[in-house]
Image (cartoon, rainbow, N blue to C red):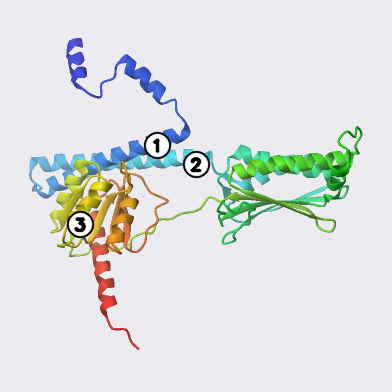
Amino acid sequence: MGGFFAERDSRNPLSVSADDHRADTQQFCCSTDELVTIDSHFFHEVNNRLLIIQFACAKLINGLSSDDLNHSTVVAIEEARQQAADLIHQFREAKKKELAKGSMTDLNEIVCRLKPLITRAAHEDVIVNTDLTSKPALVFVHQETVERILLHLILGAMAVISDCGWLTIHTSHTDGVMATTSDLSTPSPSHFVRLSISDTSCEAAESTATELPANENVLSNAVNNAVMRRTTIENVSKIVRECGGQISLTTSEEAGTRIDILLPKVPIIELPLMPAFAHPQNTRGSETILLVDDDARVRKFIKCALESHGYNVLEAHDGDSAINVATEHSEPLHLLVTDLRLAEASGCDIADRLRSEYPGLPVVFMSGLASDDLALDASSTFLEKPFKPIDLITRVRRLLDARRSAAVSELRPKND
């Protein structure tokens, strides 16, 4: 029996030896970014396999009568595939939340949690106020970093606030407002969350401190505290810049001191959804479609589905071959169906290159991963693998019909 398994292992490219196990253990001692890449590759490949199973089941079911003994078997396989796809989706969403949890922080939550500590640290006659935005103030900064920024600035302010003073912590959004930065070579994003700390102190004591001799042995408490605060602000400024944020300070004897910190906001991105209406009655066509996917089996089933509805399908396995196929094709190219994740060029790169030759070319993007950062226009759509053949055919037909309608409207004479 041991020889049998050894013989099978020798023929199996996926067999695992003791050395391989140690190598795998070392391989997975990697950074978070590398783990994200591994997870993405895993989800992409699994969803490709599920897509193949789905297309194969659809093809088999269409060729079997309901009383055929194999019909129920294929239906059972399709049900198991659907359950596996649901589990993969749930697992992926859990992983996304787990990864995002460590890199996103709600400023409002941090301020509310730390306010009792800040109040206890303040002088008895110093009033601590909070003025927080009603919307979640999510930023792309780790929680520990936000806490360190806030506490350092608060303690620095407490050291210089005079008796009967006040301190206010304020959060707000800067949507649509371009922040200013002294570094003109660095583009400044327009969407931040602002964390502001205002108090009744004045920075006049700091200018006095800078005029004192460097070897002065005795400094007043006020000057010492002012120097400490300036050092704190300089240190916090470095942290804020490393987080992709900005910091500014304004002060006057009348208004006191205000420190504004702008931190990168977590955007809420929603993919444009296709209209929720029934599948078109006529899904057939004769247009030419370029299909790009690096998995030959995926291309085979998608090509079969498209050709069964009358379309002419050209195949390519990567970006260069896609451009070559399109160049060598002397007839018009009507639509591109491409996977987003390819070895060399991405699906977006291929679409951009082809649209320089075929302006307005409709595109169906596919991926085994939800693509939150994919920018779609009216001539493109996104399908998450695994998808049903009818979903692909429907999206293809809608894009082609929309392109045809737009072309017809352009030919109509305009009213004077």
Image coordinates for residue 154, horizontal then vertical, percent: 75, 43
Label 3: how many residues lie within 10 Å, few (<14), some (14-19) or many (20+)?
Answer: many
Q: Check disc 2 and give the amino acid type.
A: Ala
Q: Is residue 241 left or right of residue 360?
A: right
Disc 1 + disc 2, Cβ < 8 Å:
no
Q: Is residue 363 left or right of residue 109?
A: left
Q: Is residue 264 left or right of residue 170?
A: left
Q: Earlier in the sequence, mark 3 or mark 2?
A: 2
In this view, the mark in front (3 or 2): 3
Q: Is residue 383 left or right of residue 167?
A: left
Give the SS element for disc 2: helix
Name the residue beneath numbered marker 3.
289
Location of the N terminus (image quadrant): top left
Give the SS element for disc 1: helix
For the point 62% across and 37% down, the residue is 144
Q: Check disc 3 and give the amino acid type.
A: Ile
Give the SS element for disc 3: strand
Distance Cα–Cα, label 3 vs label 1: 31 Å
Name the residue beneath numbered marker 1.
37
Name the residue beneath numbered marker 2.
100
Disc 3 + disc 1, Cβ < 8 Å:
no
Image coordinates for residue 347, horizontal then vertical, percent: 32, 50
